Image (cartoon, grey):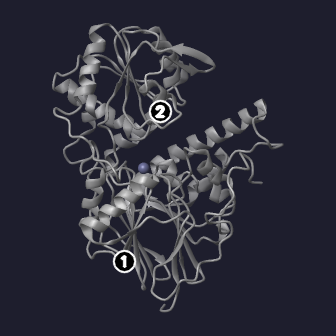
Amino acid sequence: MSGRAVTLTFLGASGTVTGSKFLLTVGGARRVLIDAGMFQGEKRWRLKNWEPFPVEPSSLSDVVITHAHADHVGYVPALVREGYAGPIWMTEGTRQLAEIVLRDAGKLQEEQAEQARRHGWSKHEEPRPLFTVADVERALPLFRTVEFEQDVDLGDGLVGRWTRAGHILGSASVRLQLPETSVLVSGDLGRHDHPLLKGRGTPQGADYVLCESTYGDREHPEIDPPHQVLAEAITRTVARGGLVVIPAFAIDRTQGVLRVLVQLLREGRIPRVPVVVDSPMALRALDVYRDSSLGELREDVAVEDFTDLPELIEARTSKESRALNRRFDPMVIVASSGMAEGGRVLHHLARLLPDRRNTVVLTGFQAAGTRGRSLQDGAGHVKINGHHVRVRAEIVRSGEFSVHGDASDLLDWLRALEPAPETVYVVHGEPTAAEHFATRVEDELDWTAVVPRYGEVVSLVPGHADPPDLEGAGEETADGQEGAGRRG
Ligand code: ZN
């Protein structure tokens, strides 16, 4: 085993927060992809989804997944479509959520390609989706589940171990041990406590650590009493006979919002009104969160703690969703998507935004260019399904729902690692957040902390710097010329 070159290539979440993909090569034979995330957000990154994968997907030996968010697992069906047929390792919770996320993504890809074809948006003869629902169905049988804190023998002396990350259900940090070296990938790390899930664990340290830095330059405010902004907004709105709309991500955010609503009701801080969950994807994820056999819930949290509402309306079909338009009594509607870019929240916003009695509560980060951001910035109108809708409803921002650790949470996670790493690679952050966090790691922990470039290759054993044979990776990769449909 000695004398093998071991390298790591940063193929995503480097210079940006999305597209997590890290390629570990061991000697000539072994190529392990850690996370297979889709690029989202800015166009220059999104276009990379359509570039040929830097190594032949069929030459990968394993794919290991940290958690079920699309920016960590969403590229899996594209890899399978391009020839990958090996095992895809993840926890059982991640498997169940990834199934929901990927089927939804496949449908969305097909719909977008169809729209591009119909409206002639694509420069290409035949716009194609990045992957189809059929590609997703081909990928699912490759999933292999692992237990938390159990060594998984991946062959050739490679041993994987998944440790709770406390971010979303099933989420983990993954440590890969080789005879020559070891590498630990944080995945996305939760805060020191999650409202529903067991907290993150402390993995064994490793020679090389990849640490996320989404909030690497921020600290979450501590608000006392918790969720007072939300409680007051609901109370005020109900008092004037209005409805509250909460755009929320389907996975984890919706479930976290329900938990807070149950708590506020029990404490008598909000009136007893019906709560609607209007998102098929969020309801499917809610079923996974309710499955206590997974062992993911905190010891002090029972299923009733996020479902025990005076009236919980689950709008699974679009007919059930449209029926809500006939109700004008005060209620709280939790609907996807979180940034109001699509999904059923749109028809609620179109109906409720023009009325001053109603309130929209934004619960998460609203990226530039999204409707959620326009609302947050006080826009007088927003465009929904081709119509300009006047915004008279109250817009409230509640910043307490993040499931990403802040800079102190991230430093605490690193500080607990034993032994200390040789180098920390700071990934999964916007450039300023990543640089800021790397500086803190060097200043406060006195460890070497590097923000890798997209496409950068590093050696994980002394004396071996030979990069693997890659096509197309690296900063010089041309962006911006091709849109949907470049594959095939
Ligand atoms: Zn995540």
In the picture as drawn, the residue positioned furthest to the bottom comes out as: 2
- Residue 215, labelled with which disc? none
Q: Residue at x 31, y 52 (%)?
A: 166
* Mark 2, other Cα within 10 Å: few <14 / some 14–19 / many ≥20: many
Q: Which residue is mark 2?
A: 339
Q: Position of residue 458 (x, y in %)?
A: 50, 75
Decide: is 483 above or below 5. above
Q: Position of residue 110 (x, y in %)?
A: 68, 40
State the quadrant of the C terminus.
Answer: bottom right
The amino acid type found where label 2 is placed reads Met
Residue 75 appears in view: yes
Q: Position of residue 317 (x, y in %)?
A: 52, 25
Q: Residue at x 56, y 40 (%)?
A: 104
Label 2 C-beta lies within 8 Å of the nearest ligand 1 atom: no
Q: Which residue is mark 1?
A: 207
Please name whichever residue, 187 or 448, is drawn nearer the observer in this view of the structure.
448
Please name whichever residue, 66 or 460, is drawn nearer the observer in this view of the structure.
460
